[in-house]
Amino acid sequence: MSTLVSATAFQQALTATAQHLATALPPTAARSIDGGIARTEAAGIVRHALAAGQSAPNFSLPDAAGQPQTLAALLEQGPVVLTFYRGNWCPYCNVQLRAYQQILPELAQYDATLVAISPQTPDFTSLTASEKELTFPVLSDAGNAVARQYGLAYGVGAEVAETLRSVGIDLAAYNGTTDDELPLTATFLIGTDGVIAWAQVEANFKHRPDPATLLAALAQLPVAIPA
């Protein structure tokens, strides 16, 4: 496998994160968060998310340096891997972002750009990029506006929001809103034609597509032939 992060290593990192949180979180908090996952799965929110074969909505969002990034401009350079994450506070997101950072050389072989989006304020987006030493665009989606266009925004519910606050995670502080909304964790591969070629959307934020799966999907994209 050419990728720097094997599927096995990636899944082991996710498993280790789950095992750590199982002992670090108070049992009542862990049960509340798992209950929130079950309710999100039962609600069928995933069915509303965009899927392969649909057009990807364009967007313009600020990156960690405050500069606007548009999907249309990124697609002029090649395919785009667009991943929605919950925030700097989410350990599972951090595992994913760091792993994806390591496959940037492989993505470059396909002229692909990796972009990560969260509802965090620009300050927290900048913190995410600097702390994780991310060299790809990390964007702030105020109010989950773009996440909503992709069918991903949902309310976590009062119980989960209060549970997160009890362990030091105040969504209002991170996101600059009081709606307690997050995006479903999702990754889209968008071809240069603006059409979603591959997608993985999860109601359970503990599940993430491994880098090998992503690269395999990218390898299946038709090569654009210059006019």
Image (cartoon, helix red, strand yellow):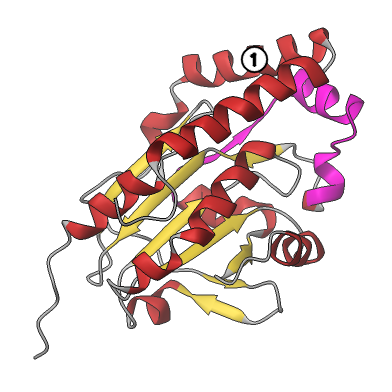
Compared across the picture, whether 111 is left or right of 114 comes to: left
Q: How many marks?
A: 1
Q: Is residue 135 visible?
A: yes
Residue 20 is a magenta residue? no
Compared across the picture, whether 35 is left or right of 179 comes to: left
Which picture quadrant has residue 194? bottom left
Q: Residue at x 65, y 29 (%)?
A: 17
Q: Residue at x 8, y 91 (%)?
A: 227
The percent position of residue 166, horizontal first and vertical second, equals: 91, 25
Residue 158 is a magenta residue? yes
The percent position of residue 51, horizontal first and vertical second, equals: 30, 44
Seen from the viewer's position, the closer of residues 139 and 221 is 221
Compared across the picture, whether 62 is left or right of 194 comes to: right
The percent position of residue 192, horizontal first and vertical second, equals: 25, 72
Q: Which residue is mark 1?
A: 34
Give the SS element for disc 1: helix
Q: Is residue 205 visible?
A: no
- Figure check: 38 above or below 82: above
Q: Residue at x 57, y 35 (%)?
A: 13
The percent position of residue 125, horizontal first and vertical second, equals: 72, 62
Which picture quadrant has residue 79? bottom left
- Mark 1: few, some, or many residues within 10 Å (few <14, many ≥20)? some
Q: Residue at x 37, y 30 (%)?
A: 47
Seen from the viewer's position, the closer of residues 77 and 46 is 77
Q: Residue furthest bottom?
A: 227
Which picture quadrant has residue 49? top left
Seen from the viewer's position, the closer of residues 187 and 152 is 187
Seen from the viewer's position, the closer of residues 54 and 170 is 170
Stretch of the chain drawn in magenta: 150-174
Which amino acid type is marked by label 1?
A: Asp
